[in-house]
Amino acid sequence: MKIGVFICHCGNNIAATVDVEKVAEYALSLPEVVCAVTIEHACSEPGQNIIRQAIEQKGLDRVVIGACSPRIHETTFRKLVAASGLNQYLLEIANLREQCSWVHEDIISATIKAKELIGMAVAKVTRQQALTSGKVGVNQRTLVIGGGIAGIQAALDIAEAGYEVVLVERSPSIGGNMARMDKVFPTFDCSACILSPKMVEAAGHPLITLQTYSEIESVSGFIGNFTVNIRQKARLIDTKKCTGCGACTLKCPVKIPSEFNLGLDKCGAVYIPFPQAVPHIPVIDKEHCRYVLNGKCGLCQKICPTGAIDYEQEDELHEEEFGAIVVATGYKQVDWKPYTEYGHGKYPDVITSLQYERLLSASGPTGGRLKCISDGREPEVVAIIACVGSRDELLGRPYCSSVCCMYSAKYAILTHEHLPDTKVYIFYMDIRATGKMYEEFVRRAQEKYDARYVRGRVSKIYKKGGRLILQGVDTILGQSVELEADLVVLAAGITSSSGAIKLAKKLNITHDQYGFFTESHPKLRPVESSTPGIFIAGACQAPKDIPLTVAQASSAASKVVALIGHEELETSPMVAEVNMRRCVGCFRCQEVCPLSAIQEETLRDGTKVAKVNAAVCQGCGVCNATCLPGAISLKGFTDDELLAEVKSLCDVK
């Protein structure tokens, strides 16, 4: 056996704290090691050439590389080893950067630890066996979850590449939060004008199937082969018969707060969400429909010209197969109820930013007429309070919501366009305008439209003489502020959408403490989730504006196309395997497996034992640690290999 050891300087990331020459000298003294070389940058082209030449000239059959985290460069070095004629799994990487140089300051102790890590890697690689990757077929259909701008963009990009897409949206219409907006910054395009064509294009695309008013029930399978159960909720409308004429919505005697207009007006128990809704088909609210509740009324059924009303309709559950999944479930505004100092529920003229969007919109509840909610008069003073639910340690949301500063400036401009004499005050902590032309946009609001910025928090809002009084502090002037306003807009922050954590469990992907889905790597894999084959796009990953959301959706789509463009995928052989002679059929491994990769198998004598689905298994090792009789081993991390690593620690000098 001939082992080659290559120690990377990684610039000064490793070499500044670790004496790499001494580590290489120590490596050369280890059994079976025939060469030990230090390299400035092992991942660079010259560095890889050094390794390749050593493999060929020395006849190496095992390779150990001391460098940075294998999470970053393991694939790079595996390809290098394979190209040099070795089995790519006869490679071991010792993490000398994250696990050694970056966590130590003393060169002597860091060098000793580096020797230990290299010794362990050499001991392990001597016990390693050549492994062979498997092949698995790929289903070339894609599921997109979420019908906002991110989901629509991803679906269109994938469909334009020639692949079939199913777009699932839990609301009656696609469009998401962007459909509620009046105009978008910094271009002031009409939101509906740029969104509606994409909605219509998605609905009419021959390779896109819309499944609105639907939810994901369960997800199983693995990359290239996912099985998804989708629940089509009952609209109580026959979508094949309905023409979207809207006659039923005009005659419904029941009036409920409009969900789309965020309670600013009312709609019937049978309604079309908004004028540009896609599909343009009503839905009946079963919780408020008189006929559903007590068998009375039925007026909508009587006047429907096509007989599309079906009170007996029930939810349908159907199973579909996909090769990839894009999650684009968007966001919701932070619940501002905990901010009792702003008068939640007491003052109707204290509203959220999305409610203000609906007031400004020509398709909104007031037809675009800006007025106070309480009495319908035009406001003389509008106060906007930024960072409501953002950058607040007390409520557990220390993060910035990214868009509030910009849409606050947008509201100042739009308010002036609607009511030129109305004064706008914006209470802010800091102005964060980092996008292209964003800083200029804020200056425009300040200089051209006279938006008055007050740096400080509002501590209390109360009513006096028919007006709202805001009390706070101007931290620049260092004095208290008291402002009279007619309408107060809370620039509420962004949080994860309702049900995001439950969906993460169904998909077996990770999320952070705020409910946002976690990317596999923030720099190198920003749209890939922790589960291969599932991608994330838009504000479900973190707060972001529309341009960044669209860019991320297209990025996720490109990853999907790269995946499903193959008829077969290569699977990792570093998976668990069961020794059926030792398995006692307790199935504790099945209970703990996060990917449901453990299945039951019945032997000829009727004995039930565990079996690993190698295509699903990701080699996490949980089953291996759980198995009491030691019937499960993990390829690439066998007991023999791990014990050899432990033993090597006793031999380090």
Image (tube, rainbow, N blue to C red):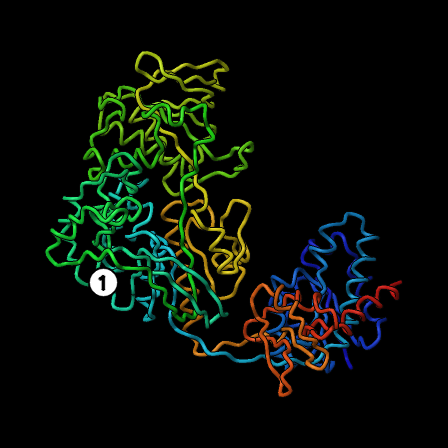
Q: Amino acid at mark 1?
A: Gly
Rate crowding at label 1 as few (under 14), some (14 to 19) or many (20 or more) other CA atoms within 10 Å: few
Which residue position is annotated with label 1?
A: 204
Residue at left 36%, top 47%? 546
Residue 387 or residue 435, whichever sits in front:
387
Q: Quadrant of residue 418?
A: top left
Q: Is residue 287 left or right of residue 502?
A: left
* Total number of numbered discs in the rendering: 1
Residue at left 22%, top 63%? 204
* Image location (x, y in percent) of residue 80: 61, 74
* Image location (x, y in percent) of residue 354: 33, 37
Q: Is residue 405 left or right of residue 424?
A: right
Residue 305 or residue 176, whichever sits in front:
305
* Image location (x, y in percent) of residue 571: 55, 75
Q: Is residue 55 left or right of residue 550?
A: right
Using the image, determine if residue 301 lies above or below residue 400: below
Residue 256 or residue 126, whichever sits in front:
256
Q: Quadrant of residue 151?
A: bottom left
Residue 270 appears in the rendering:
yes
Helix, strand or loop at mark 1: helix
Residue at left 26%, top 22%? 379
Where's the N terminus, which quadrant?
bottom right
